[in-house]
Image: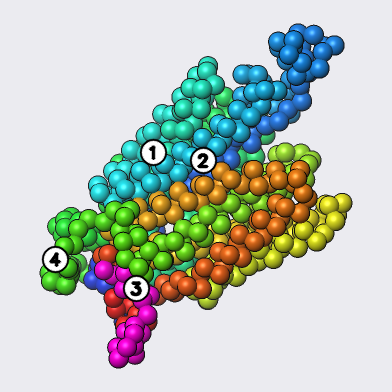
Amino acid sequence: MKFRLTAKAESDRKWNLDPIQRAMGQLGWWHILVCAVVFPLKFPVAWHQMSIIFLGPSVNYTCESDPSLDRCDVECTSWSFDNSTFATTITSEWDLVCGNANLVKLSQTIFMFGILVGGVVFGSLADKYGRRPPLVIAVIIQLVSGVGAALIGSFWIFVVLRFLTAVATGGTMVTSFVLVMEIIGPKWRELFSVLYQIPFNLGHLTLAGFAYFLREWRELQFALSIFSVLMLSYYWLVPESPRYLFTSGNVDGAVTVLEQAAKRNNLQTDTIRNEIEQYAKEKSRNAPANASKGNVLDLFRTPNMRAKTLYMCFNWFVCGLAFFGVAQYIGHAGGDIYTNVAISAALELPGTLLCIYMMKAHGRKKTLIFSNTLTGISMLAIAFVPSSASALNVGLASVGLVGMSISFPTVYLYAGELFPTVVRNVGIGTASMIARFGSMIAPFVAGMGSIAYWLPPCIFGLVPLVGAFCVFFLPETQGHPLPETLEDGENFGKRATGASTANGTANVENGKH
């Protein structure tokens, strides 16, 4: 059965495709194969971010050196740990109890800081050297440091290796997503930006299975890390982004990749070189005299780009804070830890799948406003429910988690379409960095229940509502061509003034930057 998803007969005018997208098509076998290779990266992203739940859980323990002493008595020198649920943990191996109990939380905070660093560092590297080389380097670091963390005998070396794993994981996240968004046509971006998140949900879900059968923490850490050895094949299997090659001035390289894509997608190749060279000349003529490589400062240099960056970054902060915070809030329900983690992960899937329809039918802007509002209202409602009504509280928090599972894929796609090509990686990397600040704060917010029962749900409710308000000031990106230059990024969504209002608005609506 012949399968052809792309054809010249499709209405390119409707989607206002640029020559790069027309050359490789909106979606075809080439796109599908690239995504099939890249998407599994999200499995180790989920495993490494969530594994601390099983590597360093809270376990019961008593004073072993003198059973008559309180377990945290200063004269107690060794401890006996309950191994009925976990055979070994980093807590039991390195005696992370009493005065050292906070070291487990510190190790996870350092890990999340590593994700932050990786997003920024590899985002900048990818904008300077291409998407493919930093991606391959990140995979190698992730493999070596992840396996190393399972073999060492020192807690602090474990923390350092986990930090390096996090840096690499942050790098794989930002570079792989940008690569996917730069090759998929606007007609299919909603679908594939959400499908890109599904392996994370499945990774979170399967983590409970790995942990259930691998009760020794070293075995679990090794199993979750060795998977990355398969991704060394990216050196040969993953192509460079033709958009990056074109924007960086490597027209020949862009043409080569586009011709390979067109052949795989059964599209004509004889006119590609001429069209791309003409497009490059047109861009060169229209480019300002002082045009240069983008950097993080360019996200804030001009007023419209600065406003969009701030609003978008705050919404990433919302996702980092509320997603991880609400998930932890649900985890306080008690019961079997493996079941709780599996159920919590399973709750993410309906929202992620619903996101596909919502972004397609209603666009990015309305979807993000709705999902943030859903989380905000459901979490605020908990403050008015008695603490004794645990089932209702967990139900409302679950609705909040569903809202965040819609918001996270939406901000990924929204940011990928909002930032221009020359700063797309550093833009998403910066936004991801802000999200990590939210995820680092989340455990402390969840712990504020000891101060006042209503405080955590109020914070987890109000922050998404502020995020929803900020989205009103962002332009809709659905169906528009990806902005390429800094000038494109500044002009996109800018409201025209004066006599040119009508023409300017029409240009924005038609994606003519």
Dot 4: what SS?
Answer: loop
Label drawn at residue 277: none
Magenta segment: 487-505
Q: Quadrant of residue 491?
A: bottom left
Structural crowding at the residue carrying mark 4, measured as other residues with C-alpha within 10 Å and reported as few (<14), some (14–19) or many (≥20): few
Q: Is residue 179 visible?
A: no
Asked if residue 282 is among those painted magenta in the image, a careful observer would answer no
Distance from Cα at disc 4 to Cα at disc 1 = 38 Å
Q: Which residue is mark 3?
A: 492
Q: Earlier in the sequence, mark 2 or mark 3?
A: 2
Tell which tag, 1 or 3, sits nearer the viewer: 3
- As rendered, which of 477 and 277 lies closer to the eye? 477
Dot 2: what SS?
Answer: helix
Distance from Cα at disc 2 to Cα at disc 3 = 33 Å
- Kind of residue indicated by mark 2: Met
Name the residue: 22% across, 55% down: 293
